Amino acid sequence: MLYKRSEYFRYTFGKPLDAKFRIVMGEAEEQKSKKGDCTLVDLSPGGAKLLAEFDIPFSRDAVNIQLEFTLYQAKIEVLGTLVWKESYQKDFLYGFDFEEDLEKEQLIVAELKLLRKSESSEKQ
């Protein structure tokens, strides 16, 4: 079996994790939408699958998003681009690729390890 080292692992949450998103049109604060609610279905250091009630207009043009969430302790804020969208019941699922940021990737991995460790100790 071939393994692609450039691909990230995916952590699927048993219970989706609450998060906030904003559509970003530019650098200035007035070029960002108000925050909307979403949940993280799964997460990797390079991207996430989001579930939201809000129907984000999606086309071949890049839709840039700012995503905020807390995995274990640290508040994480990442920028990236929506890469796919599909209807799911009355909501929408989105594929979200993060901008490359080694520090954020390392923080996500560290927080996922702490989260997993806390989940394991709660079961015992």
Image (cartoon, grey):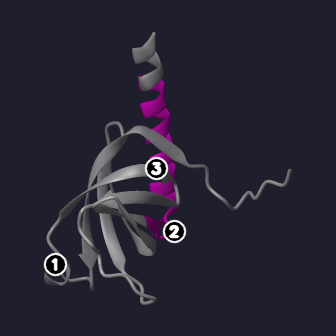
Residue at x-position 26% and y-position 75%: 23
Q: For the residues carrying marks 1 and 3, which lies nearer the camera in this image?
A: 3
Locate residue 43, reporting x and y percent: 47, 51
Residue at x-position 43% and y-position 24%: 119
Q: In the image, which residues are magenta?
A: 95-118
Q: Real-space Cα distance between discs 2 and 3?
A: 18 Å
Q: Real-space Cα distance between discs 1 and 2?
A: 22 Å
Q: For the residues carrying marks 2 and 3, which lies nearer the camera in this image?
A: 3
Q: Earlier in the sequence, mark 1 or mark 3?
A: 1
Mark linked to residue 29: 1
- Amino acid type at circle 2 is Glu
Locate residue 82, reporting x and y percent: 42, 74
Q: Earlier in the sequence, mark 2 or mark 3?
A: 3
- Amino acid type at circle 3 is Asp
Dot 2, how many residues are within 10 Å of its Cα: few (below 14), some (14-19), or many (20+)? some
- Viewer-nearest residue: 5 or 39: 39
Are the two marked residues, 2 and 3, in contact with CB atoms closer than 8 angstroms? no
Q: Real-space Cα distance between discs 1 and 3?
A: 28 Å
Locate residue 26, reporting x and y percent: 27, 85
Residue at x-position 42% and y-position 33%: 115
Q: Is residue 72 left or right of residue 27?
A: right
Q: Main secondary structure of the magenta part?
A: helix
In the orientation shown, which residue stands out farthest toward the top? Answer: 124
Q: Report which quarter residue 66 is drawn in.
A: bottom left
Mark linked to residue 100: 2
Q: Report which quarter residue 35 is drawn in.
A: bottom left
Locate residue 84, reporting x and y percent: 47, 73
Judging by the rendered image, the residue that carries numbered circle 3 is: 42
Are the two marked residues, 1 and 2, in contact with CB atoms closer than 8 angstroms? no
Say whether residue 97 is magenta: yes
